[in-house]
Image (tube, rainbow, N blue to C red):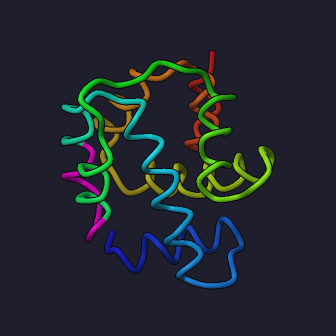
């Protein structure tokens, strides 16, 4: 998937008014995701993301991943986007479902293996939630 296709899909799923808004939401969600997965996994995921998204993910990753649940994940997304928690869930789902459709199944499984099962819903994979 090309960068413009990725943003168009996020824009469509999130019902955003512009590509710029979709890009802002995408980078916010990826920044939070990077803090939650290992640096090695960030590298693997970045290699499959289009355009500057991979570079952004690599720049956002900490030395060590943090461990927190989905509620904290959404709070952090909300902080970065200026949204309410329910809107942050919508935003995260638009980005992560697009991500799930743009990377290999193996890579998606690797990312999901580092997150509690509740996160699978945000990736559009409710059947993987425990």
Say which quarter of the image contains residue 111: top left
Residue 86, compared with residue 36, is above or below; it is below
Q: Which residues are magenta?
A: 45-52
Identify which residue is drawn at 19% across, 42% down.
43
Q: Is residue 49 magenta?
A: yes
Q: Please name the predominant secondary structure of the magenta segment in the image.
A: loop
Quarter in which the N terminus is drawn: bottom left
- 72 or 89: nearer the eye? 72
Q: x, y (%) of residue 74? A: 66, 39
Residue at the extreme top of the image, as rendered: 130
Quarter of the rendering occupied by the C terminus: top right
From this view, report whether residue 75 is shown above or below residue 11. Answer: above
94 to 128, vertically: above or below: below
Q: Residue at x 30, y 46 (%)?
A: 104
* Rendered residue at 56%/72% (across/down): 22
What residue is shown at x 71% (from left), y 46% (from top)? 89
The picture quadrant where one finds residue 120 is top right
Determine whether 89 is above or below 63 in the image: below
Residue 116 x/y as whole percent: 54, 18
Q: Nearer the viewer, residue 76 or 100?
A: 76
């Amino acid at each position: 998937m090309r960068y413009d296709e990725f943003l168009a899909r996020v824009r469509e799923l999130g019902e955003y008014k512009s590509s710029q808004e979709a890009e802002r939401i995408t980078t916010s969600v990826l920044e939070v995701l990077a803090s939650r997965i290992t640096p090695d996994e960030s590298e693997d995921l970045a290699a499959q993301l289009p355009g500057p998204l991979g570079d952004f993910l690599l720049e956002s990753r900490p030395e060590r991943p943090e461990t927190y649940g989905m509620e904290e994940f959404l709070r952090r997304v909300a902080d970065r986007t200026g949204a309410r928690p329910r809107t942050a869930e919508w935003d995260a789902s638009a980005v992560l479902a697009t991500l799930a459709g743009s990377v290999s199944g193996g890579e998606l499984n690797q990312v999901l293996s580092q997150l509690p099962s509740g996160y699978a819903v945000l990736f559009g994979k409710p059947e993987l939630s425990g």
